[in-house]
Image (cartoon, rainbow, N blue to C red):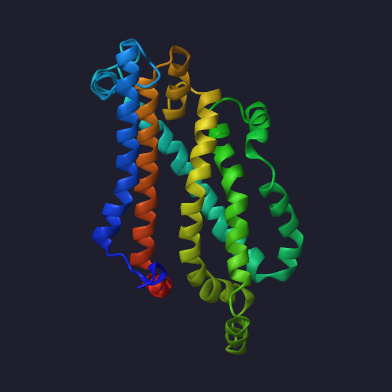
């Protein structure tokens, strides 16, 4: 049997997917042990025990100044900013994307503007956002929205435009108005695509969040990483990066699960 025709069972997928991760862990451990054998004070590749000790203090011991558990305070702050930014972007994507996709005059008017904003590097707008909105939470959330909302809007609008024209014609034949076409024909079919767009936007959203926190913040996962880097504290940086990856994977898997549960018809072709 050719490899292109082989189907992998779920248990086998979990096993195969874990192999590259285990390989990277083994490579890291071998390199860390060899570096510490040559230099016990090495900070670049900390041993697991050192990382566990550093993270224990951040997770379970309150900070002497703030009284907070630093790790959980950073996690909550970052997830709050990410959730607000992603939520606003999602609402904008479905509302503006539907209007642009269904109504050709609006598409001709707003399409170029959305495209123009989407191709601007959001990091280049960060100084403008901080000057205009200050150094508070608004600017950090705004960077996420500016970074991912235009791309999500374009994706939803393109998906709606590609819907079979026959569906719109049949709806109009039955007396549907433009508003009814948008709500009853386009919206239900755009919802699975919206979740897919959210999953694709997660990676960029994390990048913009970490960038904003690194420049102007006093709490957050990105803030902590850039705070301790001046001390070469890889025993904190590496676990924080791994934690960000775990959070991103959990959110992505949750969105994928919701999509399959809420819109099983959109996933029939993949089975």
Please name the residue shown 43% across and 15% down the image: 232
In the image, residue 96 lies at what x, y percent?
A: 61, 59
Q: Quadrant of the C terminus?
A: bottom left
Number of marks in the rendered image:
0
Residue 198 in sight from this viewpoint:
yes
Provide residue 88's location: percent of width, then percent of height: 52, 48
Image-quadrant location for residue 173: bottom right
Image quarter where the N terminus lies is bottom left
Residue drawn 57% across and 60% down? 95
What residue is shown at x 36% (from left), y 65% (from top)?
260
Whole-percent x, y for residue 210 in the image: 50, 32
Frontmost residue, 78 versus 182: 78
Question: Could you say where residue 51 lies in the image, as x and y percent from the top left?
Answer: 29, 22
* Residue 69 visible in the displayed image: no
Tell me which residue sits at (33%, 42%) in the image: 21
The residue most toward the front is 1
**Which one is in front, 113 or 13?**
13
In the image: residue 259, left or right of residue 29: right
Q: Is 246 placed left or right of 105 in the picture?
A: left
């Amino acid at each position: 049997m050719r490899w292109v025709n082989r189907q992998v069972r779920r248990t086998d997928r979990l096993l195969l997917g874990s192999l590259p991760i285990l390989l990277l862990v083994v490579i890291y451990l071998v390199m860390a042990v060899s570096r510490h054998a040559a230099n016990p004070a090495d900070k670049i590749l900390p041993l697991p025990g050192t990382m566990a000790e550093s993270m224990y203090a951040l997770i379970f011991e309150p900070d002497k100044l703030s009284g907070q558990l630093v790790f959980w305070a950073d996690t909550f702050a970052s997830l709050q900013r990410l959730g607000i930014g992603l939520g606003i972007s999602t609402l904008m994507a479905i509302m503006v994307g539907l209007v642009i996709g269904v109504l050709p005059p609006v598409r001709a008017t707003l399409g170029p503007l959305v495209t123009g904003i989407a191709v601007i590097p959001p990091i280049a707008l960060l100084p403008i956002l901080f000057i205009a909105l200050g150094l508070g939470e608004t600017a950090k959330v705004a960077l996420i929205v500016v970074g991912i909302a235009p791309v999500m809007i374009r994706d939803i609008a393109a998906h709606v435009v590609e819907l079979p024209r026959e569906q719109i014609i049949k709806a109009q034949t039955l007396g549907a108005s433009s508003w009814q076409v948008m709500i009853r024909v386009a919206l239900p079919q755009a919802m699975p695509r919206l979740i897919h767009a959210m999953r694709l936007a997660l990676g960029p959203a994390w990048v913009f969040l970490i960038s904003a926190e690194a420049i102007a913040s006093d709490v957050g996962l990105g803030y902590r990483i850039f705070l301790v880097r001046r001390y070469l504290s890889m025993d904190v940086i590496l676990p924080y990066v791994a934690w960000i990856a775990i959070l991103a994977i959990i959110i992505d898997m949750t969105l994928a699960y919701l999509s399959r549960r809420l819109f099983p018809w959109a996933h029939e072709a993949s089975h």
